Every structure is written in structure tokens, then in C-alpha cells.
Image: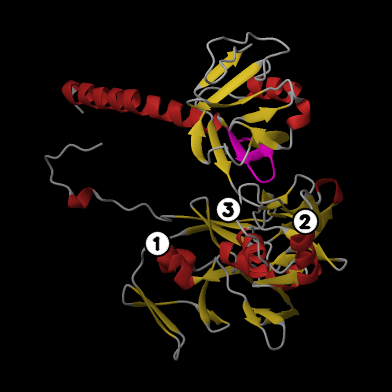
Amino acid sequence: MGMRMCRRVLWVILCLTLFALPGYAQAMEQEALSRIIINIPSRTLELYKNNTLVKEYPVGVGKPSMPTPTGKFSIIEKEVDPCWYPPGKDYIVPSGPDNPLGYRWIGFAPLYGIHGTNAPWSIGLAVSNGCVRMQEEDVEELFELVDYETSVSIEYERIKVRVDARGRGSIGIYSDIYGRQPVTLASVKQALAQAGLDGLADESFLRALIRDIPERQVVFSQFHNLKINGVLRPERIVSREGQKQVPVLALAESLNTFVNWNEDQQTLTRQNKTVPGIKHGTTVYVNAEHLPDLVGGRGIWDESENCLELMLPVANFDGQLLSGDIVRVGNHFAIPALTLAKALGERVKWQADTGQLFVQGRPASVMVIAGQPFVTSDTIGKVYNVAAAWDDQTQTMNLSYPLHPIDYSMYLNPGDEFL
């Protein structure tokens, strides 16, 4: 490559770096920002860091005649020892015990903010002129934890569904302070469904909550963590009637495998393996003790982490999960041929009636399992030009493409320069 071409390449790289770094730094800074969620009916302020709940504080909110505004805001002001300007008055109340703003002001909109109070009895009530009041020690703590541009979401949700750090699922129903949102059994069930917890609370329990309006979170279930091959999964295990149960269809979808649910027989089937299942609401579960029988691998319960650790045979393609449909065949492993073809963008034709697979018009060596074509680790290179390596410790077949490097030079003109 000539000197002029080298300089040109270096200049392009430098320009791309200069343009990319500010955007990258801004994205990292935004990710590190905290966020605040204030819910008016529950009179709570939740502080999140990187989508993790750090702390929940009790607050006071606006009275019905001067409600706290709802919507999306951000912190625009931070002030220590703020002065108070009484509406319609021509005097100023300096910082001190007579100042209703307390000793910290966190403004999120013109004339609206989160602040302390000299009336601690008002926390938990709807008595302010629209601002959000906190106990003095709480607002001073929050003041140090948030910065300008921190997002502030103010919601009006009478139904709160939560799963805390200890895995306790709870639901709370709160008073309709501003008369905006009736609560019905259907709306409570919908809130549970949106949280992925539908069918886990009895109707009689939910009806009692609606009738009594407890004004607090009521625990109704216990959840546990699930790890597969060392990776924490978003699916949660639920304890119900003394049994730990896994949402199996959601898990199967994320593992790119197929599990059939027979509602009449209450069974789950995968690759000719059948185990009992159970349905709560719209979600199908399998007892944790039956999960290894259904999807393979081995499971270990870790009491210290409240977690089921499952070692599952899976296939990764270029570092990404490809499929959980891994079958041991003698000393080798087989993976779904059509799934791999889709990932590679290969043109294939599968003839189920004859059990033949054609790759780019040529017949391929496959074996049929449960009516689908599989390719084994010892023949995969011949079928798709893919390298396969089995890691027994992580129970993972790592696939990479290509097995044999492809020489593209034949497609270039002799005088072309390329990088």
C-alpha cells in the first residue's frame, strides 16, 4: 500500500474516532444516570440505578385541588437551603425551621420540585400545593445521589406489582386520591399479567385487596433465580404449594427450542420426552425437578443465591445463542440443520416425506430426530463449512464460520487496492 493511501486510511480512522467517542461517552454517561419514579396514589418515590431499585422513600404529594403533575420530567435545579417565596406575598422566607421547603430543593419543572419539609407529619398525605415532600433526612440523602438531567417520571398507578431483591412478589392497591382511576378485578389481573405474574394470586385474595384497599404492598408469592450455563435468566422460578415451578414456554422460546403443551393431558413434550406441566393464568410452568428431564442437562440448587443453576447443552454461533436443541449421538452432538441454515443465510430445501435435506441444491448428510433434520458435529463442516468445538465445562457447542477460509481475490481486478 502506498504512503498516500496509508495517510488516507489513518485520516479516516482518526475522523471516525473523533466522531464516535463523544457519542460513546454520552451513551455511557446516560447509562450511569439514576432515574426517579414517583407514584402519586402510593405516595412513594423510587430511586433506580441502572434499572435496579436502590431505595424507596415515602413522600407527600399535592392535594386534589392542586395536584402533583404527572408525566416525564428531569432535574433542572438543585439548591441547598432554599428560600421560599409565598404565592401572592411580597416577602421571602429564608432557610430555617419556618421554611416549608426544608433544607433541600430538587426542581423538576417550573415551580415544582422535590423538597424537605418542616411538617414531617404531612409525609404520606396529599396536602401540598403540587410539590413532592420528603422527610428531611431522606431528601438530603437523595440530593447527593442524583444529578442534573436525572429523569423523573410521575405516575398515577393505584395498582403496584413488585418483586423485591429477596424474590418476594407483592401487590398493593392504593386510594384514588384524585378520583382518576377505578380498580376492578380485571385491571388487577391485567397488572399482574403485564408483570409476567398472571395466575399466581387467587381471585378471592385479589377481591379482598380491592375491597379493603390495604395502602401497602402485600406479599403473595416467592420467586427464585434461574441460571443456565452460568448466565442469569430473566425467567423467574415461582414457589407455589411447596413446589418450585419454571415458566417453561418462555424459557423454551428464549433458548430457541420447541416445547409442546397439551392442555387436555396437562403435559409438556420436547424431543419425545414428556413431563407433567401446570398452567397458571396464561403461563405454563414445569416443576423445577422435571426441567432437566425435559430439556436435558443437570440442575443444582444454590441456597445462598436463591437460585437453580442448570447446565444445559446449547449451541452458540459466533458467541450468540443459536439453539437449545442439542442431542448427543454417540461421541458427537447434533444440532438442528434448519436453524443453523437460517443463521448462515444458506439456501436449503427440506423434504420431510423423504427425510432429505438439500443445501444449495446438493444433498446433505443429516439425521432425522423427532421429524426434523439434524447435523452432527463431525459432519457439520462438510454440510455448512462451519467449525464446531464442544466445551464440556459449559456444556456448549461453539460454532464459527467459516471452517475453511474463502479466497475472494479471484473476484477482484488485478489493479484494485483493498484493505
Please say whether residue 91 is one of the residues in the magenta stretch: no
Res 271 seen here: no
Disc 3 target residue: 180
Q: Nearer the viewer, mark 1 or mark 3?
A: 3
Q: In the rendered view, would you say 91 is above or below 255? A: above
Disc 1 crowd rating (10 Å Cα; few below 14, some 14-19, many 20+) is few
Q: Nearer the viewer, residue 256 or 285?
A: 285
Name the secondary structure under disc 2: strand
Q: How many marks?
A: 3
Name the secondary structure under disc 3: loop
Could you tell me which quadrant the C terminus lies in? top left
Could you tell me which quadrant the N terminus lies in? top left
Q: Quadrant of residue 345?
A: bottom left
Disc 2 target residue: 223
Please say whether residue 43 is one of the residues in the magenta stretch: yes
Q: Nearer the viewer, residue 267 or 316?
A: 267
**What residue is at 52 percent from the left and 22 percent from the top?**
148
Q: CA distance from mark 1 to mark 2?
A: 38 Å
Instruction: Name which residue type carries label 3.
Output: Arg
Where does the image place residue 130, in percent across and percent down from the top left?
A: 58, 33
Where does the image place residue 226, in percent across and percent down from the top left?
A: 72, 55
Farthest bottom residue? 353
Instruction: Name which residue type carries label 1.
Output: Leu
Query: Between disc 1 and disc 2, whose residue precedes?
Result: 2
The magenta segment is 35-53
Marks 1,2: beta carbons within 8 A:
no
**Drawn side of residue 4 relative to residue 26, left or right:** left
Where does the image place residue 6, in percent across and percent down from the top left?
A: 23, 24
Disc 1 target residue: 344
Q: CA distance from mark 1 to mark 3?
A: 53 Å
